[in-house]
Image (tube, grey):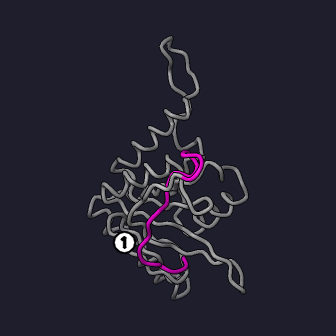
Amino acid sequence: MSGIAAKLEERINEISEAALALGIDKKIRIYYPHSMMTYDTLQEEAWLDLLNGILPEGVLFNPNDPDHYDKYVKDENGDMVEKSGKQIMEELLEFVKSDECKMLIVTEHLGLIGKGVYDEIRAALDKKTPVYCLRQAEFEDGMHYYFVKVTDVKPAFIGSWDLYYGAVVTGEDLGTPAESKLLFDKANIILSDDGKFIV
């Protein structure tokens, strides 16, 4: 094992022990609210590849992944029926309000967010859960991805409320994943020099 790998493993163990001492579950849940307009698209695939590449396995909660929640419910006759979109949205909002949700990382669609994402961000901010927006910008040397801290949400009311309901209000630019040194106190997560989240 190289010196860098040994140091990294040592740091992971230190953080894991500290998290356990604080009663924090090692399997931290980071919720990824994003526009349904991007579900099952190349854009969503690119965002998920990036996030799954920097987050520990099993940490990211993707609302477009039915494995993350029960898709069926019993009706009044006791038969299993598929949940409505409204029921799923309500359950996802309850998850955001729960102690299990430690952080949100959101992406926008055409610079805006839909009503569901708006409500989820608002609920997270109300309970002091950290929220970060992952953005991209094209430069001469290619596409750059970076995080900004979300401090608020505001209504925009442009077109369809479910798709273009509001906008995120952001604070400091946290830099690209590889450059950032992020410390998320509640979730006890930091970003290492190589851009990987360490839990």
Quarter of the image for the N terminus: give it. bottom right
Q: Residue furthest top?
A: 77
Give the quarter of the image for residue 17: bottom left
Query: Whole-percent x and y of residue 142?
Result: 71, 81
Q: In the image, residue 9 lies at what x, y percent?
A: 47, 76
Asked whether residue 27 appears in the rendered view, the answer is: no
Residue 23 horizontal side relative to residue 45, left or right: left
Part of the protein shown in magenta: 158-177
Q: Residue at x 51, y 36 (%)?
A: 88
| Residue 190, horizontal then vertical, whole percent | 42, 74
Q: Nearer the viewer, residue 55 or 37?
A: 37
Q: Which element type, helix, strand or loop, lies under badge 1?
A: helix
For this orientation, the residue located farthest to the left is 22
Image quadrant for the C terminus? bottom left
Magenta-colored segment: predominant secondary structure: loop
Could you classify mark 1 by the number of other residues whose Cα lies within 10 Å: few (under 14), some (14-19), or many (20 or more)?
some
Q: Is residue 169 above or below residue 195?
A: above
The residue labelled by disc 1 is 15
Image point (31%, 55%), residue name: 126
Residue that appears at 54% across and 60% down: 57
Disc 1 marks which amino acid? Ile
What percent of the width, then of the height, locates residue 146?
A: 55, 75
Answer above or below: position of 113 versus 162.
Answer: below
